Image (tube, rainbow, N blue to C red):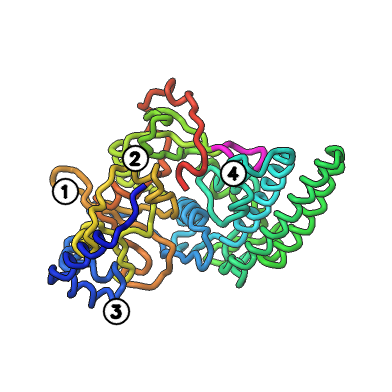
């Protein structure tokens, strides 16, 4: 291994001082964020908030200080479907929102159950095993994927926002998660200790069951206790009906969520295009469907998104969202930032290397609600309903350039009818990949 020598240091100092632009950038670096220095306002103007395909959707919603973007995006898609049905019953129906807190309660409870089941499953395994280490390293988080969202709704139903309202804890989850995960790790340690002492499965199950009762109580304190039944009133105030959360989804959602498949675009050797991949060792509703994706080339994923948008159906998508973003303009555009000039680094990297080498991860779920197509029929920019907040230039709706989409969008939830022509035999093939392949 080669060390850094004094000769090398002196040579680079002289080269740095000889280049005038370094002193200019040094002054800029001293008082500004690098992203602000790299931002090009004139380039940003090339991405106007105009779209040739533009679905009329409801107001954006804010996820708060909680990583529940996937639940917000999923419920917003479901909300658009429900409102269409409501307008058939009462045309003036417009102001409607589903409860994020309700589904987040069940998400946390199901994750705690899954975590402790994994602790039991791995009770005799070494901490050094990658799967075991991964579970205990991350424990329960706010994040999730489409299949998990769908299974939560199908099992526990949904309620309008006014039935189970936000609390301070539901919108600020860091401390709640810390306390929950501390306890889950403690119980996992008890499970592993009991196993090492030779206790039987029934005794270990009792440890878990007692812990789950306490977790249920804790989550009720944080979110409120989920309702068994409630009365929903249509906006005209004349039509009222009593529902359970499950019957409310059955009545207004029906089989809507089952129409969709989660598409991913990962050019990995172990995940052939056109075939299904299953994400292993990830949180799921136990007894529900495993987390799976259909892997397609990026150009096909984009084609399916455009088809669905033209049909008036928004597209839930997942991306590495913290790159090349100007929040003041609610804009994602890689061409509006000249990091190469400002840093001296060349950042070009293949999509495969970008995700495999962890330059980026699947970090945020959003909803595509529009696209601008050029005269050649190709997408130029996309309209995204985001969940950062409802303020700002476009009230929570963002512009995304097509070049940004190609670099950072990882998956999209697409109706089965738009992928029916893809080889169904190949879709039956299932390839396993791990959570650390995308996170």
Q: Which residue is mark 4?
A: 151
Of the numbered discs in the image, which one, if any, rests on residue 269? none
- Distance, label 3 to label 2, CA atoms, is 35 Å
Label 2 or label 1, whichever comes before in sequence order: 2
Choose mark 4 or mark 3, whichever is in front. Answer: 3
| Magenta: main secondary structure | loop
Q: Secondary structure at mark 3?
A: loop
Residue drawn at x 46%, y 38% as measured from the top left:
261
Name the residue nearer the viewer: 329 or 413.
Answer: 329
Q: Secondary structure at mark 2?
A: helix
- Distance, label 1 to label 3, CA atoms, is 40 Å
Q: Position of residue 128 (x, y in %)?
A: 62, 42
Label 3 or label 2, whichever comes before in sequence order: 3
Residue drawn at x 38%, y 57% as measured from the top left:
321
Q: Which residue is mark 1?
A: 374
Choose mark 1 or mark 3, whichever is in front. Answer: 3
Q: Position of residue 334 (x, y in %)?
A: 25, 57
Outermost residue on the top side: it is 425
- Distance, label 2 to label 1, CA atoms, is 27 Å
């Amino acid at each position: 291994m080669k060390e850094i020598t004094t000769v090398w240091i002196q040579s680079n100092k002289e080269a740095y001082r000889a280049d005038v632009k370094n002193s200019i950038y040094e002054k800029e670096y001293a008082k500004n964020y690098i992203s602000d220095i790299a931002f090009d306002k004139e380039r940003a103007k090339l991405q106007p908030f105009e779209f040739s395909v533009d679905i009329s959707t409801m107001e954006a919603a804010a996820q708060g200080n909680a990583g529940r973007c996937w639940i917000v995006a999923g419920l917003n898609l479901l909300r658009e479907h429900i409102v269409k049905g409501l307008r058939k019953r009462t045309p003036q129906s417009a102001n409607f929102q589903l409860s994020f807190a309700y589904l987040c309660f069940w998400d946390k409870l199901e994750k705690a159950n899954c975590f402790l089941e994994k602790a039991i499953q791995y009770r005799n395994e070494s901490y050094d095993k990658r799967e075991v280490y991964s579970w205990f390293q991350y424990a329960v988080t706010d994040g999730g994927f489409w299949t998990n969202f769908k299974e939560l709704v199908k099992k526990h139903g949904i309620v309008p926002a006014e039935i189970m309202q936000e609390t301070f804890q539901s919108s600020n989850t860091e401390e709640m998660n810390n306390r929950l995960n501390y306890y889950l790790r403690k119980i996992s340690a008890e499970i592993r200790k009991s196993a090492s002492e030779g206790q039987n499965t029934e005794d270990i199950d009792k440890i878990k069951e007692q812990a789950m009762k306490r977790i249920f109580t804790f989550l009720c304190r944080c979110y409120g206790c989920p309702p068994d039944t409630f009365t929903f009133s249509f906006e005209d105030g004349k039509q009222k009906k009593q529902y359970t959360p499950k019957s409310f989804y059955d009545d207004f959602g029906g089989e809507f969520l089952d129409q969709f498949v989660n598409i991913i675009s990962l050019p990995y050797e172990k995940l052939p295009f056109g075939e299904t991949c299953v994400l292993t060792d990830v949180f799921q509703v136990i007894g529900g469907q495993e987390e799976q994706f259909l892997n397609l080339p990026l150009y096909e994923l984009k084609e399916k998104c455009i088809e669905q948008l033209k049909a008036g159906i928004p597209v839930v998508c997942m991306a590495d969202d913290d790159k090349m973003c100007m929040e003041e303009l609610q804009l994602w555009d890689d061409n509006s930032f000249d990091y190469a000039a400002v840093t001296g680094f060349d950042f070009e990297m293949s999509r495969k290397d970008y995700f495999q080498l962890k330059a980026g991860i699947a970090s945020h779920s959003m909803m595509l609600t529009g696209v601008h197509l050029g005269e050649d029929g190709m997408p130029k920019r996309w309209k995204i309903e985001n969940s950062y907040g409802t303020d700002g230039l476009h009230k929570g709706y963002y512009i995304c350039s097509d070049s940004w989409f190609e670099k950072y969008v990882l998956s999209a939830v697409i109706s089965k009818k738009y992928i029916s022509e893809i080889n169904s035999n190949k879709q039956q093939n299932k390839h396993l990949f791990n959570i650390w392949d995308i996170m």
